[in-house]
Amino acid sequence: MLAGHDDDTPVPCNRCGALLTRDLTSIHAAKNSTSSKLQDYRTCPMPRCSFKVNHGVRLNGYVNELGYMDKLQHHLHEKYSSSARVTFIDLLRNREYEAQTGEVLCPVCPSPTCFAETKSFVEHFFRTHHRHLSLDEFRQRRRAILRIWPNFEDYPGGEDIKCPGKTD
């Protein structure tokens, strides 16, 4: 799935046939299915870059999801110069990164708000948007939020994409 499908290509669910993008497939699928493991991976947004992170890797028994997302941001900053990133400004913006600095962009704020770490974005989201974002607004932005914060599936607003045959 990671090698053959980009983030925007619809992927059919092998249980119910629903067509969802790769990022939403991980929330849709059963937690014990192979597709649910997709939520553990994020790929570099730069063209032809094979770098990916697995935020589901356990460190000392705990999943360090946010720290692993920072590895992707660090990769963007270290491997690609500011001018190289600016060349792909639209591509990076669509993946919630500010091209010049490589920082995470908040997909909810009306004006660009950047964060040096994923954890800072999540704290900002709960402090600023959590209580004020309607369910419809959240659903409109959930793919963007999912790109930054892979394990938000328990946040209210994902019920409409969960597989009817899902077993927890």
Image: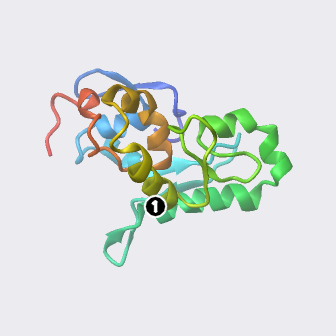
Residue most extreme to the right: 83
Q: Residue at x 73, y 45 (%)?
A: 99
Q: Read off the residue under disc 1.
A: 66
Residue 111 x, y percent position in the rendering: 62, 37
In the displayed structure, would residue 141 be above or below residue 73?
Answer: above
Q: Which residue is drawn at 50% across and 48% down?
A: 148
Residue 84 x, y percent position in the rendering: 82, 47
| Left or right, residue 64 beside residue 86 | left
Q: What amino acid is at disc 1?
A: Leu
Q: Is residue 147 visible?
A: yes
| Left or right, residue 157 beside residue 120 | left
Residue 89 x, y percent position in the rendering: 74, 37
Give 133 or 5, whichever is nearer the viewer: 133
Q: Is residue 22 visible?
A: no
Q: Residue at x 45, y 35 (%)?
A: 143
In the displayed structure, would residue 119 be above or below residue 93?
Answer: below
Residue 58 x, y percent position in the rendering: 37, 69
